[in-house]
Image (cartoon, rainbow, N blue to C red):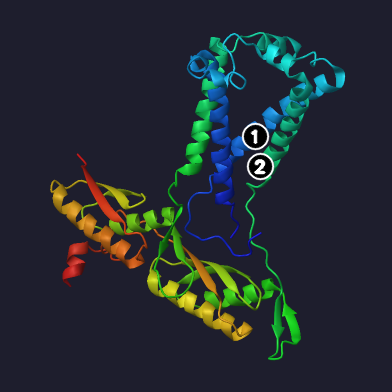
């Protein structure tokens, strides 16, 4: 077992799909142990499952129910494999890089809140919503002013200043959209 | 910080997914003309008119024990995978303090040092809360720290000061600089007020008060 801690800003660990896979494995394996174990020990299928097992055993492999089951199994396998391959968006971002070994990181949510609070002070902004993507920050501001272009320009400048103060290791480009309040 | 092994999860997901797709493709091949195109695959590929009961009867000598063993493996594997989703932290050991001749002078529980170091971080302006985890022993110490930074402070300055302080303090105590310092910064952000109040402490009209 490694004694070094994991990096702060890393790819998602995919705990949810892994937990789903674990539960499916326990269910499938447990059912198999019950069925095959009973047949191995008693020479017959369990009474509660005998009818279902006989029905499945008598079904042709090229029949529609079998093909549907195979299709669902293949689809599930594809989803699981893709969830393992896709890098995903890290929940934390490395910021303030320096010459000290190690990382300084901030959560995506804190980063979005900080940018949002700075933007809310911009003249003309009624409220703002900020979400942090992999390489950009999406900002939606609502303003009662008619001159939305000026509000967008000021908002972009404030967002860039907020991001510059934190110096994210992966540059984040703000994308600003405005909505006029009537 | 407690974490779950992402590398292990992703490896299991990819392998399991590929296995499922392979099994599905094998079953689905019974409804395709694969055997007509590839007659050599007859011993391993299923026939469209085959039934699971017929296949089981033809290979009963080894198929049933294999199915039981496979079910047991899958069940145990699922239980282990589920347990592995519980976040764990890397182990820490007591810090052994030695003299120049490598004679043991004493040992310090990691928690004692951690409390002292986190208390020192709390004295840094801008830090509202701090906690840390120290590991790697006296030979190659590493630190993972979490600090909460107030909104009014300069985050970059606070983070740099915290990291420098940790390096200096650990070097002073253990005689070795930490090999790694990870810092998680929690930013507190208060909501901007929606209204601005002018002259609220005066009973006179705000405009007249401002002109005086």
Look at the numbered disc 1 and give the secondary structure of its residue.
Answer: helix
Decide which of A138, A7 is in the foreground and name it: A7
| The furthest residue to the front | B40
Q: Is residue B141 left or right of residue A140?
A: right
On the image, the x and y values in percent for residue A16 come to 56, 41
The lab-note entry on whether marks 1 and 2 share a chain reads no
Quarter of the figure that contains the N terminus of chain A: bottom right
Find residue A23 and name its label: 1
Decide which of B55, A96 is in the foreground and name it: B55
Quarter of the figure that contains the C terminus of chain A: top left
Find residue B82 and name its label: 2
Decide which of B12, A153 is in the foreground and name it: B12
Q: Are marks 1 and 2 in contact (CB under 8 Å)?
A: yes
Q: Is residue B10 left or right of residue B211?
A: right
Find residue A70 and name its label: none
On the image, the x and y values in percent for residue B33 come to 48, 14
């Amino acid at each position: 077992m490694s004694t070094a801690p994991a990096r702060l800003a890393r790819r998602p660990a995919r705990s949810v799909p892994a937990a789903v896979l674990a539960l499916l494995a326990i269910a499938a394996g447990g059912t198999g142990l019950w069925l095959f174990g009973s047949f191995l020990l008693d020479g017959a299928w369990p009474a509660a499952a005998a009818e279902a097992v006989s029905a499945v055993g008598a079904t042709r492999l090229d029949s529609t129910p079998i093909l549907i089951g195979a299709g669902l199994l293949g689809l599930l396998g594809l989803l699981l494999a893709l969830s393992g391959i896709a890098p995903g968006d890290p929940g934390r971002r490395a910021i303030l890089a320096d010459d000290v070994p190690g990382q300084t990181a901030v959560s995506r949510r804190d980063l979005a809140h900080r940018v949002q609070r700075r933007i809310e002070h911009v003249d003309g902004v009624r409220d703002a919503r900020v979400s942090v993507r992999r390489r950009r920050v999406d900002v939606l501001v609502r303003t009662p002013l008619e001159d939305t272009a000026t509000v967008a320009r000021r908002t972009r400048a404030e967002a860039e200043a907020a991001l510059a103060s934190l110096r994210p290791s992966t540059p984040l480009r703000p994308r600003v959209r405005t909505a006029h309040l009537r | 910080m407690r974490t779950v092994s992402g590398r292990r999860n992703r490896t299991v997901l990819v392998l399991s997914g590929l296995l499922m797709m392979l099994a599905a493709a094998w079953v689905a091949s019974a409804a395709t003309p694969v055997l007509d195109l590839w007659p050599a695959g007859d011993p391993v590929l299923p026939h469209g008119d085959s039934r699971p009961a017929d296949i089981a009867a033809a290979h009963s000598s080894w198929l049933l024990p294999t199915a039981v063993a496979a079910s047991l493996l899958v069940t145990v594997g699922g239980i282990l995978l589920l347990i592995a989703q519980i976040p764990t932290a890397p182990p820490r050991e007591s810090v052994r303090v030695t003299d120049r001749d490598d004679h043991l002078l004493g040992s310090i529980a990691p928690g004692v040092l951690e409390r002292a170091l986190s208390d020192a971080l709390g004295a840094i302006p801008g830090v509202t809360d701090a906690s840390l985890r120290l590991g790697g022993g006296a030979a190659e110490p590493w630190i993972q720290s979490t600090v909460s930074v107030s909104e009014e402070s300069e985050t970059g300055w606070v983070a740099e000061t915290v990291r420098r302080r940790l390096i200096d303090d650990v070097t002073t105590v253990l005689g070795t600089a930490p090999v790694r310092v990870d810092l998680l910064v929690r930013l507190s952000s208060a909501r901007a007020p929606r209204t601005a109040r002018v002259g609220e402490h005066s009973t006179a009209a705000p405009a007249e008060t401002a002109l005086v």
